[in-house]
Image (spheres, grey):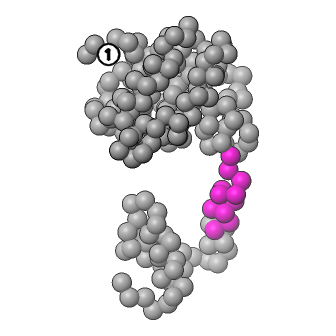
């Protein structure tokens, strides 16, 4: 792609680094910004810079947060005895949108994937085990994507937690195998949480 401006080319290159954004889409976005008021573009840039510089991860659940402890973990209205284990913040948002869950979360920060070089040590597994050991937790709900990586991660976590005096459950499989949690519609996801099943019962299937 030939550019009439080095500044334009640099901006397009940076936008095209975003996932799912090719050069043509990046060029369209950059040209759109050039057609906006300077103040709007500056506000856009400032928001991204502020996000990167000030965003935190909750010290309890590892969810993205504006403060050391996120609003969900800090809320007295949430059931602290029920922990929903998810892959990342997008899954927290998807579950919250169902309005079917009132517990707290634990964000792993990924899934076990030997092919990608991601092992248990790369995830927030130890902190989950420590949360369970406090004795306040009565149930851990696995809400991970129905993929090979998701199943592998659940199997590993079950081995780490099975000796603890808690109930271990998983969302009902109204979600097809290979489905990413964030793309499941709210009704299906909500029902999968409401009709969750004991994890050990799924091992024999």
153 or 74, nearer to the observer: 153
Q: Is residue 166 above or below residue 126?
A: above
Counting from the top left corner in percent of width and height, residue 58 is at 67, 38
Counting from the top left corner in percent of width and height, residue 159 is at 45, 19
Q: Is residue 107 above or below residue 201?
A: below
107 or 5, nearer to the observer: 107
124 or 142, nearer to the observer: 124
Residues in magenta, as a range: 45-56
Counting from the top left corner in percent of width and height, residue 78 is at 64, 22
201 or 51, nearer to the observer: 201
Rendered-image quadrant of the C terminus: top left
- Residue at position x 65%, y 42% from top? 57
Q: Is residue 46 visible?
A: yes
- Left of 107 or right of it: where is 16? left
Please tell me how crowded label 1 is: few (under 14), some (14-19), or many (20+) other residues with Cα within 10 Å. few
Q: Residue furthest left?
A: 205
Q: Is residue 102 visible?
A: no
Number of numbered callouts drawn: 1
78 part of magenta stretch: no
Q: Quadrant of residue 82?
A: top right
- Left of 80 or right of it: where is 6? left
Counting from the top left corner in percent of width and height, residue 18 is at 46, 63
- Residue at position x 66%, y 72% from top? 42
Badge 1 marks a residue whose secondary structure is: loop
Rendered-image quadrant of the N terminus: bottom left
- Left of 135 or right of it: where is 159? left
Residue under label 1, please give it: 203
Q: Residue furthest bottom?
A: 4
- What predominant SS class does the magenta segment belong to? helix
């Amino acid at each position: 792609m030939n550019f009439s401006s080095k500044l334009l080319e640099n901006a397009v290159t940076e936008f095209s680094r975003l996932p799912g954004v090719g050069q043509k889409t990046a060029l369209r976005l950059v040209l759109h910004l050039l057609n906006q008021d300077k103040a709007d573009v500056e506000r856009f840039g400032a928001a991204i810079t502020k996000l990167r510089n000030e965003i935190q991860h909750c010290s309890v659940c590892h969810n993205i947060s504006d403060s050391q402890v996120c609003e969900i973990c800090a809320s007295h209205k949430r059931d602290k005895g029920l922990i929903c284990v998810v892959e990342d913040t997008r899954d927290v948002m998807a579950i919250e949108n169902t309005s079917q869950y009132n517990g707290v979360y634990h964000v792993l920060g990924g899934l076990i994937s030997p092919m990608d070089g991601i092992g248990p040590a790369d995830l927030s597994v130890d902190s989950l085990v420590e949360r369970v050991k406090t004795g306040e937790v009565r149930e851990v709900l696995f809400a991970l994507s129905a993929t090979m990586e998701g199943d592998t991660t659940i199997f590993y976590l079950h081995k780490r937690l099975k000796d603890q005096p808690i109930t271990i459950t998983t969302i009902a499989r109204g979600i097809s195998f290979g489905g990413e949690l964030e793309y499941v519609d709210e009704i299906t996801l909500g029902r999968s949480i409401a009709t969750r099943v004991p994890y050990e019962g799924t091992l024999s299937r």
